[in-house]
Amino acid sequence: MEWAKVLVPAVATLIGAAVIILGWHKSHQLASVRDQENKRRDLRLTMMLDAYRALANSAHRPFVGDIAFEAEKAIESIQLLGTPRQIELAQQLVAEFAEHQEIDWKPMLLELRESLRRDLNLEKAGGRLQHLRVVFPPTGDADGLAYSGPPGKRNR
């Protein structure tokens, strides 16, 4: 019976230590998975926000130079990290541009806006997209700000 007085507390201590170690290990695993998911989410959100801004910036502007380059990068980011619907829209935009040399960004911008707002737990945004485009006179006179008028045919 003497051995039971020593063995029972020792076994209880070992079981307690094992439970603590296993609990710590599982907690660490879950925290690591959560951290990876958060990093993945942050990366995707950052890239999709950048893509949205680049595409919105190119709307109603001539599709040349830096604007075209940034839009190309945005399409690549969407094809890499976008939702299946966004990837489908990106591929449609590429085909549309190849065939007609013009792009209607509206479906993609609306899809990105809704997806980003959903990911950021914001309420749905109704209404249409509007883009402010300011045209400066050739002299660069800031007092001569004017509305650029309806979009051209090359880039809606």
Image (spheres, helix red, strand yellow):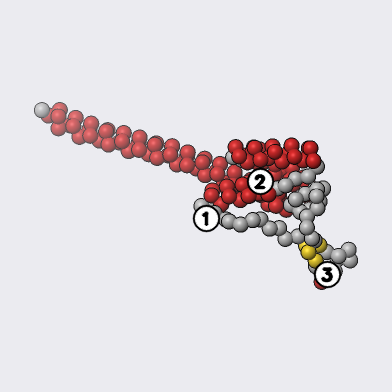
103 to the left or right of 41 = right
Of marks 3 and 2, the one in the foreground: 2
Q: Few, some or many C-alpha atoms within 10 Å of disc 3 (few <14, some 14-19, many ≥20)?
A: few
In the rendered view, tell whether residue 140 sits above or below residue 126: below
**Element marked by disc 2:** helix
Q: Amino acid at mark 3?
A: Gly
Dot 2 alpha-carbon crowd within 10 angstroms: few under 14, some 14 to 19, many 20 or more: many
Q: Amino acid at mark 2?
A: Met
Q: Which mark is residue 144?
A: 3
User: Residue 123 got which mark?
Assistant: 1
Instruction: Give whichever of 38, 45 is nearer the camera.
Output: 45
- Residue occupying the point 75% across, 45% down: 103
**Could you tell me which residue is drawn at 58 percent across and 56 percent down?**
126
Q: Which residue is mark 2?
A: 108
Asked where in the image residue 138 lies, by quadrant, the reply is bottom right
| Rendered-image quadrant of the N terminus | top left
Under tag 3, what secondary structure?
A: helix
Q: Pointers 1 and 2 in contact (CB under 8 A)?
A: no
- Which comes sooner in the sequence, label 1 or label 2? 2
Q: Is residue 68 visible?
A: yes
CA gap, disc 1 and disc 3: 38 Å
* 52 displayed left or right of 20: right
Residue 154 position, x and y percent, is 80, 48
